Each structure stands twice: as structure tokens, then as C-alpha cells.
Amino acid sequence: MLSNLTDRKASPTRNLSFENTEVAFRHSSNPDLKRAYWLFRAINVNFLVSIGPPITNFAMAIGLPIKRLIKATIFKHFCGGETILECDNTIKNLSTGGVGTILDYSIEGEDEEAVFDNTRDEIIRTIERAAKDVKAVPITVFKITGVGRFSLLEKLDAGYELSVTEKSEWRKVQSRVLTICEKAHKQGIPVMIDAEETWIQKTIDLLALDMMERFNKTHAIVYNTYQMYRHDKLESIKKDYEQAVDDNFILGAKIVRGAYMEKERKRAEEMGYPSPIQLNKEATDKDYDEAIRFSIKHIDRIAIVAGTHNERSCQLLAELIGDKNIDPKNPHVYFSQLLGMSDNLSFNLADAGYNVAKYVPYGPIKAVLPYLFRRAQENTAIAGQMSRELSLIVKEMKRRGI
């Protein structure tokens, strides 16, 4: 069925370097670089990041004109715009460097049916935008909590009986997901279902696998997300692969290290159950790389999006692609990073001929603020990554003489 995917010779990985800042920042103007420099300097100050969210929320609540400042700084760096149309410049800018866009409508924490319907319709618009230029927008994404109530998913995961009203509500959630995946299948555009908290993830996993069984018979259309900071997720990929073989569909797997780690540990401690999180980062890294190896071994049946800002993991995947003589443009293998981060990975991988796509969040500024605050807080938690980002920006500024 997919034998033609591995019969072309890969580009040698010796051509791949993550130190080339000229390639990494070719898409960035001098003002862009200066803004990024000062932004990362500010994010690297833990005090500013800790007081930023409450001050920002308060300022917006009382009507202070802070929106323009946010849009010109942190929003401009990490987001594509407030609408799909506003993302066009970002899409074109990434595309000139061979990097695709994953449009991510970043609305969180809503609980109204009308909002869920609107979000479904917006996700469909991202699929339609991708269909107009698949090379520039090769993949789409959504969260189940964007189209369904968190507490409803929580009740389902816990195995509680739903009321008549809740059963009707759940059918609407399933219908929204089905509509999105049907649209993706019809347009031939892959759609990823993002991972969320462990106490709603089982329901998400079952729904994602059901969509794969329906729509992934000949091509990878629907992807589920595996967070490898969970100690059970390597086994999940292997188990889901077996189901894909038994039921004759392609397993779509976005493989990430993950988010929500501190929240997960805190909840486990407060509620008295074993933490689902790996004991340390080394265990997470080990399982991440093993998941990549397993997926490449079964590339005819597994399509992966490797979401990582880890240079060693990117190098490993590139080496595996070369060792197995897999075409770097094989549609079953994508590298992915977030907009505004790790450009040295994204653009150098693309320059070496690999499939790369960046997450480009968008949406109304107020609605996207939780995403932006999370990016800042995660960055300060990874001191090495922050130092790396800054050092590369400084290196390129010196090369340009600015």
C-alpha cells in the first residue's frame, strides 16, 4: 500500500547544521532580530514573567490601552495575527524559507455551545486555507476542548454516568470532531488533535483513534498527540500501532515531550494518586527518542510529526531518515517547532531538504493571552533553551553588524 514511501535515497545528514544563523534568521529583518533580542532578555527575567500575567489581565480588565503594546511585542513574535487573513504575511515569510505553517486557533477555556460551534467553523476555515496552498500550510490542528466542555470530558474520563442533557452535549462534541475530520479527509489535509491533561486524555485518545480508523485508510489524515513526559505513552504508541495493523489504518502520531507537567504533578500530589509524569527529564528524552525510532522502523504504517526544540532529537531523526534511505520529503515524517522559537532548527532542517512546519497560533489577543503567558513561563523554566535562543540571535546580530 505504501511501499513507494521508502524507496528514494535521503539527503546526507552531514549537510545539516544547527549553527548556521544566516539560514536560521534569513527571514528576519534587522528590526525583527532586535525585537526578539529584547523580548527574550525580558522573558529570561523570572520576576517580570511572574508579575506579567496578573498585571496584564488587570490592565485589560480596567480598559488600559495595553493591547497595542502586547500586539507589537510578545504577540507579534509568537503569533501570526488575530485572524487567518492576518497570518498571511507570516505564512509567506515562513514559506520563503521552506517552512510550512500549522494554523493554530488558540482559544482556550470556553464553555458555551455557541463558542464551540464557532470554533469548529474556524477550524474548518483553517483546513480550507490549507487546501488553497498545501505546500505553505501542510497541516492543521485543533483541541478537543476547543469544541467541547472540559468538565464533560473529565466526567467521561472518570467513567461517571452522564445525564440525559450531558449525553446530548457529548453527541454534539462528537459531531463537531467528525465534521472537522470529514472536511480534512475530503480536502486531503492532515489534522492533528492536540494532547491535553491526563484526566481527560483517555476520552480524547479513543475519539482520535476512532477518527483514524474512519479516515486514515490510505493516507494519514488524523493525528493524535503523544506526550512523552508521561511514563505510559511509549507503550501507548506501540499499542496503537498494533491496533492500526489489526484494523488496517495508518497511525498518525504527533510526538512531543509535552506541556502541563507542573499542573499534573501538583494534582497527583493533592489527590493522592501516582504521578503520571516521568521521574526526570532523562527518562522523558529516552522515551521520546525511542518513540521516534519505533515510528521510523514502522514508517509504512506510522506517520509522525516530531514536535521538538531539542537539537539532539532533531539530529537523531535526520540520521534515522538517512540510515533507512527514507526520502526527506516522505509525507510520513515532519519536524515541527513553535513560531518564534528554534529558528535554527526549523530553517536549517528545511534548507537541508526535510519537511518542516511551525505552529502559528492566532486569535483575538485577549483569548490568546493564556497561550502567550504559557510560552513565557515555559521558556524561563528552560534556562538552557533561553540562553541558546539569545546566543544565536546575538551571533546573527554580530554577523550583520547591528
Image: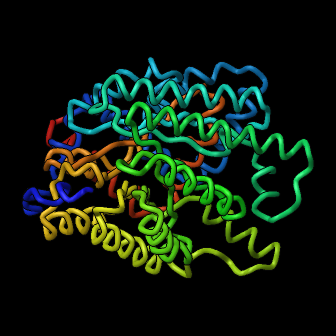
- Front residue of 199/253: it is 253
- Front residue of 317/128: it is 128
Q: Quadrant of the C terminus?
A: top left
Q: Residue at x 17, y 55 (%)?
A: 4
Vertical placement of residue 289 versus 28, above or below: below
Vertical placement of residue 326 versus 103, above or below: below
Across and down, in percent, residue 313 comes to 31, 66
Q: Residue at x 88, y 53 (%)?
A: 162
The answer to whether residue 38 is seen in the rendering is no
Q: In the rendered view, does 396 fall on the left or right side of 146?
A: left
Q: In the rendered view, does 69 fall on the left or right side of 251?
A: right
Q: Residue at x 28, y 62 (%)?
A: 300
Q: Quadrant of residue 129?
A: top left
Across and down, in percent, residue 267 comes to 75, 68
- Front residue of 25/170: it is 170
Across and down, in percent, residue 262 comes to 64, 65
Q: In the rendered view, does 225 fall on the left or right side of 171?
A: left
Q: In the rendered view, does 312 fall on the left or right side of 195?
A: left
